[in-house]
Structure formats: C-alpha cells, structure tokens
Image (tube, rainbow, N blue to C red):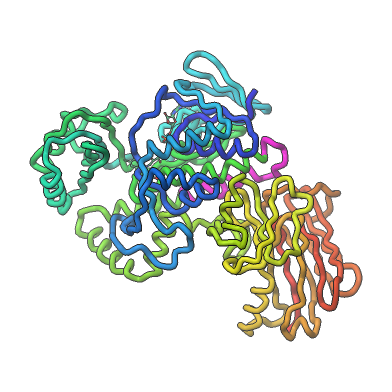
C-alpha cells in the first residue's frame, strides 16, 4: 500500500505530487496518456503561481523558458496599464505554454522522488476505513491510504464518487487549432485585426511556422468528445474571415466551451478532488491552470500532515473550506467577463462603463489581484488584515523570505528574537531577522505561505490609542503561532503606564494547522483574568472540542508578562481608558 495515489499527471497532479514528496509521502501518479501531449492550453502563469514556484525554488527554471509581460487586459480583455503598488515582488505575467509548465513540473516531481506511471488509466475505485483501491484499465489494482483525483474536467474519480458537478452547461463552443499557414504573416495580422473588430477571433504565432487559432465553433459537429477536423476549421475561417489563410499540417485540433461547473464537495472519505476535476470555467483571464496549482499547494502539506499522523482534527477538511470559495469566486469572475465580452449593446455599454471604472487605480488593482490570486484571503476567523493572506516575498538580512521556504515547512519569522518554536521545531522553521520590509513584529507562515498568525499588539495598540475612540473596555488583539511565547511588552501609552489592564483573554482559532499537546479535556469556558500583573492568572479554554490549555502569564518586569500560547491563539488585552 502506498500513501497517496494521484489520478492524473496534469499540472495539478504533478504539483501535488511534489508537495507531498517534500514531506516524504510515498506518491504514485497515474497518467492515462502514454506520452506528454506537447500542446498548450494555458499560455502563462499569474503572480501567485509565480510566487509558488519561487517558494519552492523552481522559478529560475520557469523564467529561463518563459517571458515576462507587464500587461493589463486580463479582465475581459479590457486593456489597462499594470497597476502600481501591487503587493508582490513578481509584478508580471509569465508567458509559458502549458506543455513547458508540465515538463518542468514533471522534472521536479521526478527529482523529489515521485513514481509517475504513464499509460495507466484509473477506471474504478473503492474505499474502506483503511484505504482506497484503484482499479486500472489493464485489470491491475493499486491500493493507497488516500487518492486524489486530478484527472481534469471530465474526471473519472469525481464520477465514480458520485459527487455532483452543478453549474451552467456550455452555451458557446470554440475550436482551438495549432496549424501551419500558407498566408504571409502581414496578411494574417491585418485580416485578423479586421475580423476581431466584429467578433471574437484569435490568430497568433505560436511556434516556429505554427499559428494558434481560436474561432467560435458554430455549425461544428455536436459530439464534443470527437476532435474537430481541419476541414471544419477551414469552414469556420472562411465564414469569419473570408479566407482560410492556407491552413495545413495541423499539430493539434481541439474544442472548448464556456461551461461553468463546481464540484459540490472536494472530498468523499479518503478521496479528494483538485484542479479541473473540481472546477471548470471558460479560459477568460487564464486562471484554470493557476487555480489547480494553488489547490495543490493548499492540499499538499495538509494531506502530508494527515498521512504523517500529526494533522489536527479538521485540517484536511480546511482544504475544501478554503479552496471551494476561491474557485467559486473564479467561476464568478469568468461569468462576469463572459458577459462583458458579449457583442450585444447592453453588455457593451457595461463594458464601456467598466473600462471607465478601471481607470481608477484601486479598481484596476482589485481586479488584477483577483485574477492573479494574490487577493486570496482564507478565513481563519480572525479580523487581522494580514492573517489568512499569503505574505509577499520580503527581503531579509540573510536573503529573501521565499528562499527559506523551499522545503515546504512552516516558518516563524521573528523580528523580536524573543519567540520560539519549541515543541514544533520538527515542522516549523524559526528565523530571527530584523528586516525592515516586514511591518509586524513576527509572522507565522504555513507551508503554503499564508499567514497563520502574526504578532500585532504594538501596532494595534497605537492605532487604537491614536483613534481615541476606544472606551472601556478597549481591546488589543494579537495572534501568535505554535508554542510561541508572546511577550506583552510594556506600551508607551498612558493606559498601560497607569497599569489599567483589566484582563487577558485567550480564545482559540477556528482551525489550527498544528495539533496542540493533548491535555485533559475541560469545559469550554473563557474566563477573563482580574489582573495578570498580580499573581497567577489562568485562562482555561477549549477548542476543537478535544483539548484544553492553561495560560499562565509570568511577570518579567514592570508592566510586562510572558504568555505561553497555543497555535494561532487570539489574545485580547482589555484595559480601561
Ligand atoms: C483553450 C484553453 C485555454 C486555457 N488557457 C489557460 C490559461 O491561459 N491559463 C490558465 O491558468 N489556464 C488555462 N486553461 C485551463 C487549463 O488548461 C486547465 O485548467 C488545466 O490544464 C487544469 O489542470 P489539471 O491538472 O487540473 O487538469 P488537466 O490538465 O486536464 O490534467 C488532467 C490529467 O489527467 C489525465 N487523466 C484523465 N483521466 C484520467 C484517468 N482516468 N486516469 C489517469 N489519468 C487521467 C489526463 O490525461 C491529464 O493529463 C485553458 C484551457 C483551455 C481549454
């Protein structure tokens, strides 16, 4: 029995395999095609995927084969300048065809020890409380503790699980062709520009002597699983452009539609879905491959934790809780883009209005953050703006942050030098660095680079005091990471100087990625201490229904206490004005 079977060796499956291997999980990828296709559906990577590659030390390889573009125009093709002040160190699109992305991901997966089996089609599966049995087309079987369906939009795994795939069926279809042309490039360019003024029409050089055409598939064969023919492509070109440009020697002919669907759930027992098997949408904005890679990035470390036995209750479940809404949002933005691309007068009027709005920098930036996925924020049940977001790469005294994340471990980045990861050092790295680029005292990053907790007390303190709006009791909040000792430093404001601290309350996050030590169960109460400065203060609380923890601050000086806190705990300091 292996640890994990991944059905499907596309970008999602390959990325997931490598993420699991970083944690020494035994992985077998089953890919039904005997050879890589060599064709490109997706043409590039957006910011968040570029960051993901950087976080795993793969970016140099992608940059070597790709091309950077600083162009707007993702949203419904409305072209606007690349917004300034984008919160990333990688403010560009990386043009790289999907076949090259798959090649690089395959190479990496093999380097880290993935067993990729080509020409192996999964045809059936069954599961029990101990594992999953995959049936293969050649009649053999393979058993694993978990199985992930990364087998694309027509997912066999999803169908076998009986997971619903509701949404909107295709209303329009397009032909996609990679072909050689006889017409001179200037003619092709001029005619294509003319046609594009009236209808959606794609004709662009793709590779040496090869053009990539995208044309609507009106009057093309109904049967969607059968690839279109060269004759059908020629017919559509004649109908739309009045010429077929002398297309010949097709490299690839396929079709795609504007169907939009989202799996009802991402998990059934020991089987999960990721990438196109969980969501499909039209390619507006070029998001599908990116979304799949980011699904894999979210799922990898959680599934590895589950396999390794240290995942807390609910960690694997948080994969769906975090990624399903992200996919729903992508589906929605493609719906909106599809409307804006309609040639009808109403949508065209809205498109003009949208274009005007996008001249506002904030609107432009908001849309780019959506499409590039750097605006994604997971709901960790915490109001702090940083918590739940991915942290951009920041310069540290000893290099760059992302350079420290290649191993796929959690990371506590501490500017104070007073925190620790005692108890969690086997899975969380601890880095003390006084980088000025980081504007919080400390952050705890998950293996996928999202901020699980940050120490914000001093900042929020001063913000509250400046606002002057706080009346008793005012609250300061701070979130800390696993096993971290949070130092409540004496603040230089009148309230703390007069030591009017009324209480300390520690509440638990809704989910924590790291299991806290099992303690005796206790009732779910949250008491507020009377005065932490005087003697013993105890806050007992329960979280996830199974464990409880006692917080006993130690006074370390005038107005300063140390609070040992559990992973992701929320600290409230309450004081009188
Ligand atoms: C025209 C077009 C343009 C696009 N442009 C972009 C773009 O610019 N940017 C972007 O981000 N996305 C784009 N996309 C979307 C992108 O191509 C997909 O979202 C992406 O390929 C999904 O990756 P995946 O690994 O989840 O699934 P897939 O790429 O579909 O991979 C699934 C794999 O599973 C294998 N498989 C299937 N069934 C089985 C089975 N039973 N057993 C074993 N193996 C199986 C398949 O052979 C395949 O290799 C575009 C899509 C289209 C159609």
Q: In this view, does 382 lie above or below 282?
A: below
Left or right, residue 388 beside residue 50: right
Which quadrant: the N terminus? top right
Residue 21 included in the magenta stretch of the image: no
Residue 233 seen from this side: yes
Given the current orientation, which residue lies at the most extreme top position? 139
Q: Which of 152 and 458 is in front in this view?
A: 458
Which quadrant: the C terminus? bottom right
Q: Is residue 98 above or below residue 422?
A: above
Q: In the picture, residue 202 is in which quadrant?
A: top left
Measuring 82% from the left and 63% from the top, which residue is drawn there? 539
Q: Position of residue 76 (x, y in %)?
A: 30, 55
Residue 316 included in the magenta stretch of the image: yes
Q: Where is residue 336 in the image (x, y as percent from the top left)?
A: 34, 55
Q: Is residue 468 above or below residue 70?
A: below
Measuring 40% from the left and 41% from the top, which residue is drawn there? 280
Q: In the picture, residue 534 is in which quadrant?
A: bottom right
Residue 167 seen from this side: no
Q: Position of residue 62 (x, y in %)?
A: 43, 44
Left or right, residue 358 beside residue 528: left
Q: Which of 45 and 59 is in front in this view?
A: 59
Which residues are drawn in magenta? 306-327
Q: In the picture, residue 453 is in which quadrant?
A: bottom right
Which image quadrant shows ligand 1? top left
Total labels drawn? 0
Q: Where is residue 402 in the image (x, y as percent from the top left)?
A: 56, 53
């Amino acid at each position: 029995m292996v640890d994990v079977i991944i059905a499907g060796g596309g970008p999602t499956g390959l990325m997931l395999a490598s993420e699991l291997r970083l944690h020494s999980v035994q992985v077998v990828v089953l890919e039904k095609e005997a050879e890589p296709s060599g064709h490109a559906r997706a043409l590039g990577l957006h910011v968040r995927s570029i960051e993901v590659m950087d976080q795993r030390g793969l970016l140099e390889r992608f940059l070597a084969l790709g091309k950077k573009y600083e162009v707007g125009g993702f949203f419904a093709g409305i072209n606007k300048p690349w917004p300034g002040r984008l919160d990333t160190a990688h403010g560009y699109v990386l043009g790289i065809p999907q076949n090259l992305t798959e090649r690089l991901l395959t190479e990496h997966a093999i380097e880290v020890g993935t067993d990729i089996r080509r020409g192996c089609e999964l045809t059936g599966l069954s599961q029990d409380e101990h594992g999953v049995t995959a049936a293969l087309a050649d009649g053999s079987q393979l058993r694993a503790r978990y199985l992930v369906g990364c087998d694309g939009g027509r997912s066999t795994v999803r169908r076998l699980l009986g997971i619903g795939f509701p949404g909107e069926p295709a209303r329009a279809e397009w032909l996609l062709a990679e072909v050689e042309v006889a017409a001179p490039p200037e003619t092709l360019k001029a005619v294509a520009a003319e046609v594009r003024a009236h209808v959606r029409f794609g004709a662009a050089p793709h590779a040496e002597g090869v053009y990539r055409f995208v044309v609507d598939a009106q009057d093309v064969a109904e049967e969607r699983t059968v690839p279109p023919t060269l004759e059908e492509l020629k017919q559509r070109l004649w109908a739309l452009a009045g010429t077929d440009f002398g297309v010949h020697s097709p490299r690839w002919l396929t079709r795609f539609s504007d169907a939009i669907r989202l799996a009802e759930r991402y998990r059934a027992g020991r089987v999960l879905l990721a990438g196109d098997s969980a969501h499909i949408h039209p390619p507006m904005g070029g998001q599908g491959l990116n979304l799949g890679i980011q699904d894999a990035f979210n799922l990898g470390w959680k599934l590895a934790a589950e396999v390794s036995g240290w995942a807390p209750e609910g960690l694997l479940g948080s994969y769906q809780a975090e990624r399903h809404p992200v996919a729903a949002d992508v589906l929605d933005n493609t719906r909106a883009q599809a409307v804006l691309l309609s040639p009808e007068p109403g949508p065209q009027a809205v498109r003009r209005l949208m274009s005007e709005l996008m001249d506002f920098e904030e609107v432009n930036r908001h849309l780019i953050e959506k499409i590039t996925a750097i605006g994604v924020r997971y709901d960790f049940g915490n109001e702090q703006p940083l918590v739940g977001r991915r942290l951009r790469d920041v310069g540290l005294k000893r290099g760059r942050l992302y350079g420290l994340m290649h191993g796929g471990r959690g990371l506590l980045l501490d500017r104070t030098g007073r925190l620790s990861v005692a108890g969690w050092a086997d899975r969380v790295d601890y880095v003390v660095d006084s980088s000025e680029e980081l504007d919080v005292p400390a952050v705890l990053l998950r293996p996928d680079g999202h901020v699980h907790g940050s120490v914000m007390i001093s900042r929020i303190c001063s913000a509250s005091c400046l606002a002057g709006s706080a009346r008793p009791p005012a609250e300061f909040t701070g979130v800390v990471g696993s096993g971290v000792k949070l130092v409540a430093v004496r603040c230089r404001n009148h309230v703390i100087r007069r030591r009017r601290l009324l209480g300390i309350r520690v509440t638990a996050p809704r989910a924590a990625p790291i299991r806290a030590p099992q303690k005796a169960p206790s009732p779910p109460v949250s008491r507020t201490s009377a005065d932490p400065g005087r003697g013993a203060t105890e806050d007992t609380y329960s979280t996830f229904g199974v464990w409880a923890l006692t917080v006993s601050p130690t006074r370390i000086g005038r107005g300063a206490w140390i609070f040992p806190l559990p992973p992701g705990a929320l600290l409230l300091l309450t004081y009188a004005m």
